[in-house]
Image (tube, coloured by chain):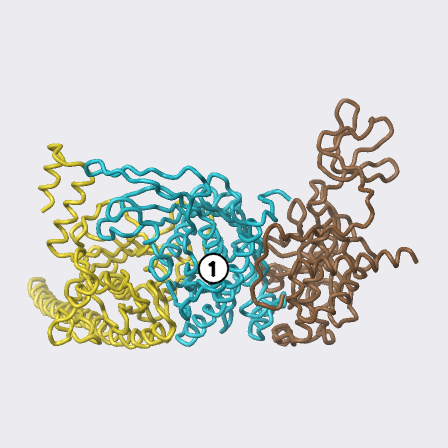
Chain colours: A brown, B yellow, C cyan
Amino acid sequence: MTEHVSIRLASERVNHCVSSSNDTPRFYTPGEVISGMQDFMRGHGTYVEEDCLKSSVAGVMQKVNKLICVRPLKSRYVGEIGDVVVGRVLEVQQKRWKVETNSRLDSVLQLSSVNLPGGELRRRSAEDEQMMRKHLKEGDLISAEVQSVFTDGSLSLHTRSLKYGKLAQGVLVKVFPSLIKRRKNHFHNLPCGVSMIIGNNGFIWISPKPQGMMVDGNEDEIINYEMQPVDSTDREIIARLKNCIAALVASKMMLDDTSIMFAFEESLKYEEVKELLDPEAMLDIAFLTQHRLNNIMEE
Amino acid sequence: MEGRPRALLERGLCSAVDAQWLMMMMMMMEGRDCLKSYDEVYSGLFDEKGHRKDGREMKEARAMYARGNFVSQAKGSSYIEMNKTKVVCSVFAPREISHQNEFSTVGQLFCEVKFAPFSCHLQRQPHVPDAEEKALSVALRKALEPTVCCHLFANFQIDIFVYILENDGACLAAAITAAGLALANGAVPMYDIITASSIAIIGDKMFIDPTEREEHLALSSPETKQNHGVITMSRMHGLKQIADFRQIGSLDVDCILKATDILEEECNKIVPKIQMILVRYINNGIIQQKKLAEAAKEREAALKIKMKEWSSSIIKISD
Amino acid sequence: MAGVLLSRTEKVFIIDGVKDEYRSDGRSTIDYRPMELETNVVSHASGSARLRLANTDILVGIKTEIDVPKPDKPALGKIDFFVDCSANATPEFEGRGGEQLANSISNMMQRAYQSPQAFDLKQLCIFEGKQCWKLYVDILILECGGNLCDAVSLAVKAALFNTKIPFVKAALMDGGNIDLQLSDDPYDSKLLDVGSAPLLVTLCKIGNKCVVDPTAEEEKCSSVSLIVGVTGNRKYYSDDDTEELPAFQPKCSAISMHGPGSITTTTLRNAINQGIIAAVCLDEALGKTVVRERRDIEKFKRHSYGFLK
């Protein structure tokens, strides 16, 4: 796609399927009987009726020992303690922030689970409460960890580590949470020179690599530093990564640092980043990435 | 004029369509020139000297008469007259937005433009806003939004009503200028004075501040591929910003850019007039206030003298 | 559309990107996202088209009807635009929620099609002063992912290109009324000349520059946008390459501003020029696509996809 506009016909649509193997897993539809109740436990996406375990969503079955779950492709994020998430502050409330994390209910970040400037251990005063909006305001993006899960399924987050907290300049990419591979580390400093946070909730944050932390600087300096324009090479890499992720998602491939990096390397043969918006190029990249992943698996 | 066809219709002497036709025909005889060919109408726009029919030069806008404080009940109001185009505008005090669930952090403008039933050749339906009135209302709101300090009255709305008494072209421009004046007159906080101007283009001729005939012809089509169209631009003078720009017709780029420059100049020409009206209005207010203050002083002085007289008489009595 | 929240730093990132002419997905300021088009998707309409641009999905159906021309324009047909923002697109459109948006789009389309140099209504005339065709252009917004105006104008032009008007076989004068006999054969119909039909380009002002085809995030960073309607070039829409056509110069058929902000004269000038460049590119791409589709149909190479797959 070198011209400015491309209009294709529906008949020329690209099929994004890259799966090489022909064996598709067994799919369940809502109401379908999975098994008798006797020796299984009911997990997400299932319900019990007349001594039978039935599926409540359309998706694939997952079995962990005796627990049976049905996972749909499009689902909202179901949080687990210790997950790294990227979220957006929706509302400033009393002593807590409401954060959107793509889960069924909005998550909560308590004022007490935030590192405030000026030392780790100190009491939260009334002043801090009034300063909450200065710390995080509506629309701000944060990275955080899931601290606990409430009974209704909403999450409580914390940012009590230097690696968590408010995010500065960069791009947020939203994907299905079910496409994110769980890994030990979700913070990556990629060899191409930018950093990336792959949130378990399907929010991926790509940003330029921080040039030395500015923890001690005063507030004005930090703000000034945050507002510095990003240089063009970083910008190009960020755009390329974003389009690569979009290509992988279009083909429903699992995302982690390896697959994204492979896709990035494969994409380098397209000189201009905007060429990657073309469906054919997207399929090409997904296909090549799948191929490389398969090679690694075989080794 | 319209009675005859209607009577024929009622008596069943002609069909409804025919009655409509007859009415139209009669209207044409009266003033409109639909039956004439394009060239005839075009040459009809000029007099023998090559001036426009109303004696103006091509580049000459109509003289504008404007005043504030036209409607005493409104918070602010204005009246603008450009020969046969006459516009009244009134602004009412901010009130809470009704029927709204969400809190809006900026105030809103509610604009309504209405044509008087006798404002045009066509008979207008009173009460029901037609498509043109709706479009004009939206255009007016768009033009005024950048100039009013909307953040100062969160969750409130300001009502702006424009009534076009007579339409002889450039009514949107007149409406915007009038609304700007009425807002300023009503002491609604504004970033800048807003003025608007209109231009009609036919071929290489540019009619500044067009009459309805000129506008109509500029919108209808010549056979040739020449430029034709109408542009209305509103401008904030001090900020040097264009608040709204509407073009319709078919014009090439050079023509639009040239017209933009001319319109900019025209908009600027109106600004001192508006400023003068506002200043005069405030000045009058100050003079009025001074007079009142003096009268109060006089009364007070008279009262003091009286008091003295009384107190002395009381003393005398007590003696 | 609405509902997108952005932090201050994200906005800075986008604004700086536009300043560098490098947007967050690598596009420059006059690049569009890839689009997908299919015409003739609705069997009951005379012409139809469906266009997808990223998340925006537009379906246009054109119906024809015989009508009486306006007395002051006896030789011209009529064209009417109607936009329906269905609640399928976003829940905000529920009830009368989408009415304002729908009105502003249909208004803009009506104005852009007003000039005979943009769309010649004479071709819709059947019998001067008595009968003409009236085109009802119904625009359905199935999904709304920003940049509606551009997508709507493209879909409308494609649908008009696809529109077939039956031939009139005979006309009987009966007193003052005319009885028309229309051809029943669907192949016995004429196509419209839509080469010059205008396309709308939305220029979203971000920082001091304007971009075309903004994403929802980019729309959030801008307070004002300029919509420019630009007439099309017949050359791209004719099957016959040998036909001699007069030299083409794109003209503006409508301009309007949207949003609460204002712009300087210089920005206006640049934006109009930029819009015309973008519109010419769009026009060429659309023309190539629809002509290719027509050729494929003639050779029976293509079958319809519709909403499946």
Query: C116 or C11, which lies in front?
Result: C116
Give the number of callouts. Answer: 1
- Image quadrant containing the C terminus of chain C: top right
Name, please, the residue furthest toward the top. Answer: A50
Q: Nearer the viewer, residue C200 or B276?
A: C200
Residue C107 placement (x, y as % from top left): 37, 54
- Three-letter amino acid code of the residue under disc 1: Ser
Measured as percent of width and height from the top left, residue B199 is found at: 27, 69
Quadrant hosting residue A91: bottom right
User: In the displayed structure, does residue B14 sit left or right of residue C303?
Assistant: left
Q: Indicate the position of residue C113 as horizontal and vertical percent values.
A: 37, 57
Bin the neighbour count of mark 1 within 10 Å (Cα to Cα): few under 14, some 14-19, many 20 and up: some
Regarding residue C265, the answer to whether it shows in the image is: yes
The residue at the point 51 percent across, 59 percent down is: C286
Placement of A231 over or under A120, stated as above or below: below
Whether residue B238 sits left or right of residue C204 in the image: it is left
Left or right relative to A193: residue C164:
left
Left of B23 or right of it: where is A67? right
One can see residue A91 in this view? no
Q: Secondary structure at mark 1?
A: loop
The residue pinned by badge 1 equals C238
How far across and how far down the image is residue C31, in percent? 56, 66
Extreme right residue here? A299
| Chain for disc number 1 | C
